[in-house]
Image (cartoon, helix red, strand yellow):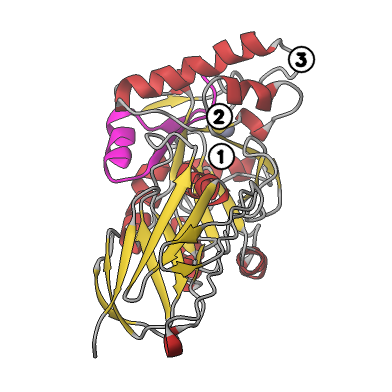
């Protein structure tokens, strides 16, 4: 879609990219009437929030009690908000031991621990009402019913919509991702052992890298995953954080289990510290997923007058759901400006005539040229 708009007093051309795939709408205005200020003004939504170079989500499955005792304090210390997924049958009013029939029982979080995580800004996600693979051949309406059981259970506790499904066993073949969408989830996390591109082809088949045990991944592989996350979206999958020498680790060792799906709190902290050091955007699955959807479905229009730049964003998305602020990079010809309508209003001296503004979708931003 291309619109030609003629503004009063001067002529300008708006090139509007309505693209689903091309988020960064480029707008060029040719203005000859402003003499030395006649440089272009361009605005685009940055790939990641606050123009970070990559995105990472830390996700946990099965609601192991060790996530609360060992992972949670490390996450809080480092300022990381994660996604914790819940199995309906395994969660009660207090922490309790549970497992699939024939498996080693492991202590799981109760609602008080999960609600504490939620209150601290972590995401609660669904991981099946029972810990069983969904049947890929089951008719979609029946799968939807199954998936709604865990969704409504969590929603009844947090009074907020649940948007993320971490499929049991990461299994998402056949009708499963279709049903997740119909059940009202926005994001589905499967396996695949890779990173997601900046615009994933299917939000119901999000890839994840799984932590298998204390040494897999080792620090070299973990760093490699982080390197791959540059420009992309890495989702990490954790389960248990048993201490070396704990009763659980002794049982695991005595059964020669290689993939314990557990790592020590020490190793977890090392991984989280490497994660923080690369300065990516680290946020829950639904937070990053929403940003991507907004970025890819929002248009920008820029209007410039002699001393002001007006930036308007437009989207057809439901703003009650898609309510994450976007980061807009503006290239402008002025050095000192004031900004209104953003989350970081104020007076700024631009660096290389670039400005980064965080703003909610469809909130008008006004940039005013200030005198030196
Ligand atoms: Zn699981």
Residue occupying image coordinates x 37% and y 23%: 155
What mark, if any, has residue 104 been given in the picture?
A: 2
C-alpha gap between disc 1 and disc 3: 36 Å
Q: Nearer the viewer, mark 1 or mark 3?
A: 3
Instruction: Classify 10 Å Cα crowding around label 3: few (below 14), some (14-19), many (20 and above).
Output: few
Left or right: 301, with 339 as reference point: right
Question: Residue 251, labelled with which disc?
Answer: 1
Q: For the magenta stretch, what is the residue range?
A: 105-129
In the picture shown, does residue 295 fall above or below 45? Answer: above
Return the mark for residue 177.
Answer: none
Q: Which of marks 2 and 3 is nearer the N terminus?
A: 2
Contact, mark 2 vs mark 1 (Cβ under 8 Å): yes
Label 1 CA crowd tier, 10 Å (few <14, some 14–19, many 20+): few
Q: Which of marks 2 and 1 is in front?
A: 2
- The answer to whether residue 157 of the structure is visible from this angle is yes
Task: Residue 347: give x, y in percent of width and height.
Answer: 24, 76
Comparing labels 2 and 3, the label whose residue is closer to the camera: 3
Q: 317 and 144: which one is in front?
A: 317
Distance in Å between CA atoms under marks 2 and 1: 9 Å
**In this view, 234 is above or below 37:** above
Q: Which of marks 1 and 3 is nearer the N terminus?
A: 3
Please indicate whether residue 100 sits to the left or right of residue 329 in the image: right
> Which residue bears the numbered disc 3?
137
Q: Earlier in the sequence, mark 2 or mark 1?
A: 2
| Quadrant in the picture for residue 141 | top right
In magenta stretch: residue 258: no
Residue 127 screen position, x and y as percent: 53, 29
Query: Which secondary structure lies at badge 2?
Result: loop
Mark 2 and mark 3: Cα distance apart in space: 30 Å
Residue under the image location 45 percent in, 43 percent down: 83
Q: How far across and down, in percent of the image, does residue 261 sit?
A: 59, 44
């Amino acid at each position: 879609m291309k619109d030609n708009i003629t503004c009063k007093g001067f002529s300008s051309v708006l090139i509007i990219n309505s693209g689903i795939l091309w988020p960064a709408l480029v707008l060029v205005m040719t203005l000859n009437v402003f003499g030395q200020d006649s440089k272009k003004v361009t605005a685009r939504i940055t790939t990641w929030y606050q123009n970070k170079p990559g995105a990472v989500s830390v996700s946990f499955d099965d609601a192991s009690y060790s996530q609360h005792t060992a992972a949670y304090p490390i996450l809080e210390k480092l300022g990381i908000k994660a996604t914790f997924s819940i199995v309906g049958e395994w969660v009660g009013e207090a922490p309790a031991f549970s497992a699939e029939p024939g498996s080693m029982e492991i202590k799981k979080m109760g609602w008080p621990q999960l609600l504490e995580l939620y209150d601290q800004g972590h995401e609660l996600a669904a991981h099946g009402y029972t810990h069983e693979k969904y049947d890929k051949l089951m008719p979609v309406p029946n799968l939807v019913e199954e998936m709604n059981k865990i969704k409504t259970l969590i929603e009844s506790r947090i009074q907020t919509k649940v948007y993320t499904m971490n499929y049991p066993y990461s299994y998402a073949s056949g009708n499963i991702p279709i049903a997740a969408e119909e059940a009202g989830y926005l994001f589905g996390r499967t396996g695949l052992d890779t990173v997601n591109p900046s615009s994933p082809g299917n939000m119901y088949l999000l890839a994840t890298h799984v932590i298998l045990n204390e040494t897999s991944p080792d620090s070299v592989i973990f760093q490699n995953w982080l390197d791959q996350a540059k420009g992309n979206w890495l989702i990490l999958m954790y389960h248990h954080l048993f201490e070396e020498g704990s009763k659980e680790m002794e049982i695991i060792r005595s059964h020669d289990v290689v993939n314990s799906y557990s790592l020590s709190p020490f190793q977890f902290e090392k991984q989280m510290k490497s994660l923080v050091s690369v300065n990516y955007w680290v946020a829950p699955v639904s937070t990053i997923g929403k940003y991507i959807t907004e970025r890819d479905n929002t248009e920008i229009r820029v209007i410039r007058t002699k001393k002001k730049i007006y930036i308007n964003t437009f989207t057809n998305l439901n703003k009650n759901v898609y309510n994450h602020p976007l980061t807009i990079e503006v290239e402008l010809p002025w050095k000192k400006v004031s900004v209104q309508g953003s989350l970081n209003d104020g007076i700024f001296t631009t660096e290389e005539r670039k400005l980064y503004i965080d703003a909610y979708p469809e909130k008008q931003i006004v940039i005013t040229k200030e005198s030196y």
